[in-house]
Image: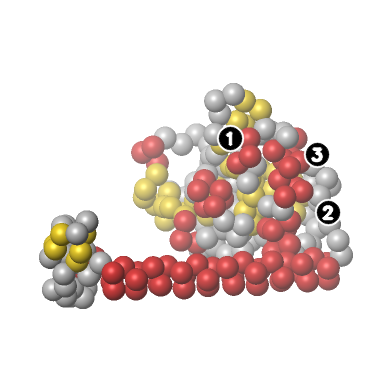
Amino acid sequence: MGDIGQTYTGLSGKTKDDFGHGQARFVTYMNVFSNPISSLKMTEPIEIDPKQNEVEIGDVFFTTSSETPEEVGMASVLLEKQGKTYLNSFCFGFRPSEKNNSYYLAYMLRSEATREKITLLAQGISRYNISKNKVMEVDVPIPTLDEQGFIGQYFSSLDHLITLHQRKQKSLKILLEKILFPQTKYCKKLNLCHNKKYIKHGEDTHGLQQ
């Protein structure tokens, strides 16, 4: 990977008092860990600091530490930001020097083949860490830009479809809870409760206890 870009560090020299306020934002660890594409919703406020490395659209973030080797070096790509934005101190950034499809990079870096290579770099006992220099030595497939676009679009559409199904599943679960358990606090809050009898272990009960 070192042939196609350069790395940079996340926030440094900060204490807990520096977080939670300010006109800038920073990308959180959980944002990088959880999302192939970085989420604007998972950034937090911090003061503007010209000494820090500001992230740019198209940058790739990697987690440097985790409790298991299988979870270290998780990658996330930045496609949008609002104002000055930095990267948390438990990750490092990678800025491609060549034009690449960001969606391709996002899903390729989380593919099973690439994850296996990165997992082998993890070092530690109770907590595992990874060296950004070692990550830069990892060979990754970089097809033509057109091919990247095709592959990136395919996985982006697949990810979107999975998200839609998850939302439908969540909505269905809530609906079933309303029907099956109308006496729960959730349903009462929505004024959806009804006085129905429930049979439990052969005894009549009037709803479920809160």
Task: Give the structural element (helix, strand or loop) at label 3.
Answer: loop
Q: Say which amino acid is labelled 2.
A: Pro
- Find disc 3 in the rendering and name its residue: 137
Q: Secondary structure at mark 1?
A: loop
Kindly identify the residue that appears in the image at 50 percent across and 61 percent down.
Answer: 40
Question: Element type at marker 2?
Answer: loop
Farthest residue to the right: give it.
144
Give me the C-alpha separation between circle 1 and circle 2. 25 Å
**Location of mark 1 (residue):** 68
The mark lying in front, picked from 1 and 2, is 1
Image location of residue 81, percent across then percent down: 54, 62
> Left or right of 60: which side holds 96?
right
Q: Nearer the viewer, residue 100 or 188?
A: 188
Compare marks 1 and 2 and give the one earlier in the sequence.
1
Residue 159 lies left or right of residue 105; in this view the side is: left
The location of residue 157, given as percent across then percent down, is: 65, 72
Q: Is residue 20 above or below residue 13?
A: below
Based on the displayed image, in which of its 4 quarters is residue 73 positioned?
top right
Colour scheme used in the picture? secondary structure
Q: Which mark is residue 141?
A: 2
